[in-house]
Image: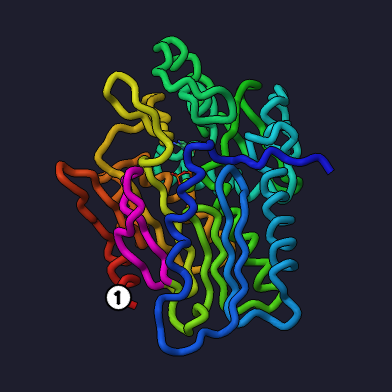
Amino acid sequence: MKKPAMRLLPRRVRAAWLALVACAGLIACGAAPDPQLEVTGPTMGTYYAVKVARPPAGLTADTLRAGVERLLSGVIATLSTYDPASELSRLNRNPSTDWVPVSAALYPVLAQGQRLSAVSEGAFDITVGPLVNLWGFGPGAHSDAVPAPELIQAARERVGYGKLELRTEPAAIRRQRGDLYIDLSAMGEGEGADQMAAWLESIGATDYMAAVAGTLRVRGKNALGRPWGIAIEVPDPEQRSVQRILPVTDRAVSTSGDYRNFFKAGGKRYSHHIDPHTGTPVEQSLASVTVVLPAGTDSARRADGLATTLMVMGEARGLALAEAQGLGAYFILREEGGFRELTTTAFKRIAVE
Ligand code: ADP
Ligand code: MG
């Protein structure tokens, strides 16, 4: 089998995986922990990590690894723009402006993207790909330079979720322009976490944590019989310290940050969150957003997309949307001399569970 390009996310974010998974394990304790299986490995330019406490009979670390890696390869083969052979890459090279069939695996991710665009008035936009690539945050070269205004303008003309139509039965998409380029990287980790969770449930796991980088699903309790502890890190690439540990059971959690995948030019920082309305990376004091949702089908993908959406919307609009939608959301703002936290009402309830 052809080895897929194992990257959805750029190299620069590779280290970020640790952020949310490091603390899910055993914190010093007198009682002997229950058995737990643990596997981790590279995927999507970052890492996956899965822990299963009190695993179902017959599950071994080897079968766990094989199972999740097969799923994650499938996600990459469907929606990675880093794998030239993926379904999405083939679609992006297809200049047709007629209806083009899409697989049952790809369709829901596209539909999720369009829903997020509608709810965020276009702050989230899966057609933002030409701008992502132009700014050096896509699969091509990373120039670490601000693109010329005319190139930004040309890319902006290709962007707009209204230029993309979706149809079910049979699942298909139609693009108004043949040069539309779809980027689903903002939901790739979440799709991976949801698929791992669905598979774990299907084999009888009741207590697990399944993460791709900073996006994960948890169910049940850890090996100590306690809620899984999810570490949210201080949004500073120089530090590897924990801002807060969130105890969670039956949740999807995703953190989006501007502090790992960025470049500096002319004294300014440019991050990988692009405002489709301006064609430029968002400039703001928001350093990271963590979204916490009840666990369920597609919940990690939704949390992943929402975290990116809130980052693009920024502190004021993002917080207002999160409140209006009743989302559990935790914002960390960069301020002179440190960080400031903002949380939604739903998050405050989760944090004291
Ligand atoms: P983070 O968790 O930091 O948000 P993600 O990988 O989940 O990281 O999302 C960032 C990626 O989303 C970018 O690298 C880019 O491919 C894509 N992206 C950037 N801006 C937008 C946007 N406005 N709407 C949708 N996707 C975007
Ligand atoms: Mg995301």
State whether residue 122 appears in this view.
no
Residue 147 in picture, x, y percent from top left: 43, 16
The residue sitting at 54% across, 60% down in the picture is 211
State whether residue 94 appears in this view.
yes
The residue sitting at 29% across, 59% down in the picture is 243
Looking at the image, the residue that sits furthest to the right is 1
- The crowding category of the residue bearing disc 1, from other C-alpha atoms within 10 Å (few below 14, some 14 to 19, many at least 20), is few
Q: Is residue 177 above or below residue 166?
A: above
Looking at the image, the residue that sits furthest to the bottom is 31
The residue sitting at 70% across, 22% down in the picture is 95
Q: Which residue is mark 1?
A: 352
In the rendered view, does 164 fall on the left or right side of 347? right
Residue 259 in picture, x, y percent from top left: 36, 41
Magenta-colored stretch includes residue 233: yes
Provide the residue span drawn in magenta: 229-247
Q: Which image quarter is the C terminus in?
A: bottom left
